[in-house]
Amino acid sequence: MMNFLVKTIANAGALAVAVWLLDKITLTGAGTGKKVGTLLLVALIFGLVNFLVKPIVQLLSLPLLILTLGLFTLVVNALMLMLTSWLADKLDLSFHVEGFWTAVLGGLIISIVSWALNMVLPDRD
């Protein structure tokens, strides 16, 4: 349970950095509290997408992952971010990623920041 909470907080922090750095990844809301709540919900969705969908996509794209020496992972991460944006829209959350290349760059930022935060945050489970 603690590990899940730490990963969700790390995802929320990583998503916040991507929103801050990229104009085409947007998070809108009335106030800071609403934005933080939305960010946590989007982080949960992102975590679920990465847990449930990403392994299937990676398995199906294994030949491309091998052929590109893992660089296709950037495309997979972008697709997971776009799927998260689509699901957030369906759930009426104010999070949006505009365009594939924005998703690629956003996925890269989120991966780096999430990795760094997971190194710093406690991991007990």
Image (cartoon, grey):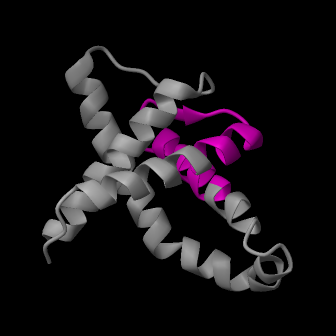
**Quadrant housing the C terminus:** bottom left
Name, please, the residue furthest toward the right. Answer: 67
Q: Does the magenta stretch include residue 99?
A: yes
Examine the rendered structure and indicate whether residue 93 appears above or below residue 108. above
Examine the rendered structure and indicate whether residue 26 appears above or below residue 85. above
User: Which residue: 44% across, 34% down?
Assistant: 17
- Viewer can see residue 75: yes
- Viewer can see residue 26: no
Q: What range of the chain is rendered magenta?
A: 78-107
User: Which residue: 82% across, 77% down?
Assistant: 64
**Quadrant housing the N terminus:** bottom left
Characterize the magenta stretch by its predominant secondary structure: helix
User: Which residue: 35% across, 19% down?
Assistant: 29
Image coords of residue 66 (percent x, y): 79, 82
User: Which residue: 42% across, 58% down?
Assistant: 115
Image coords of residue 121 (percent x, y): 22, 56
Report which quarter residue 24 is drawn in. top right
